[in-house]
Amino acid sequence: MTRYPQGRRPIRIALKFCGSCNPEIDLSSLTAQVHKLTSGREDIQFVPFDTQELDLLVILCGCRRSCADKEEYKSQAKRHLVIAGESLDGSPQSENLLASLIAAGIGRPAG
C-alpha cells in the first residue's frame, strides 16, 4: 500500500550544479535553504540527477554565464527552473529570495 493519495508518487526533483568556477551566489547555502524550506513535505522527493522520470530539474549556476543550462539536461525532466547568479529563469532576483522562489516553484504543475 502506498502512502500517497490515489497511488501518486512524490514529485521527483533533481539538482544539477555548475562547476562553480566564478560564483556570484553561495550554491551550498542556497541548497541547504531549499532543503530546509521543503523538509517535511511528503509530496516531494529529492533524487540523483540521473534518476529516470524526473518531474523537476533545478539547474543551479553560480553566475549569469549559466554554463549548466543545457538542453540535454533540461530534456531529462518534465519541467525545470534555472538559477543563474541572482536570477531565476532569466528574471533578476535577490539572492535572499531565491530559496523561497525555488520552494514555491516546486509546487507548480508542469506545463
Image: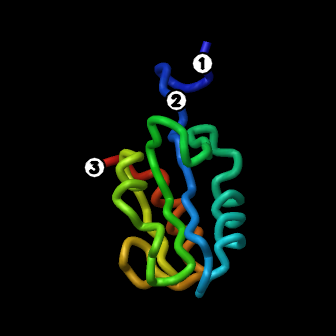
Of residues 71 and 55, the one nearer the viewer is: 71
Mark 1 vs 2, N-terminal side: 1
Mark 3 vs 1, N-terminal side: 1
Mark 3 vs 2, N-terminal side: 2
Of residues 24 and 95, the one nearer the viewer is: 24
- Real-space Cα distance between discs 3 and 2? 18 Å
| Callout 1 crowding tier (Cα within 10 Å): few <14, some 14–19, many ≥20 | few
| SS assignment at label 2 | loop
Q: Badges 1 and 2: C-beta atoms under 8 Å apart?
A: yes
**Which residue is pictured at 62% across the width and 76% down the height?**
20
Colour scheme of the rendered structure: rainbow
Residue 11 lies left or right of residue 30; in this view the side is left
Residue sitting at the far top: 1
| SS assignment at label 1 | loop
| SS assignment at label 3 | loop
Tell me the kind of residue under disc 1.
Thr
Tell me the kind of residue under disc 2.
Arg
Disc sitting over residue 106 in the figure: none
Locate residue 66: give its quadrant: bottom left
Tell me the kind of residue under disc 3.
Gly
Q: Which residue is mark 2?
A: 9
**Which residue is pictured at 71% across the width and 72% down the height?**
29
Disc sitting over residue 111 in the figure: 3
Residue sitting at the far left: 111
| Callout 2 crowding tier (Cα within 10 Å): few <14, some 14–19, many ≥20 | some
- Real-space Cα distance between discs 3 and 1? 26 Å
Q: Badges 3 and 2: C-beta atoms under 8 Å apart?
A: no
Q: Which residue is mark 1?
A: 2
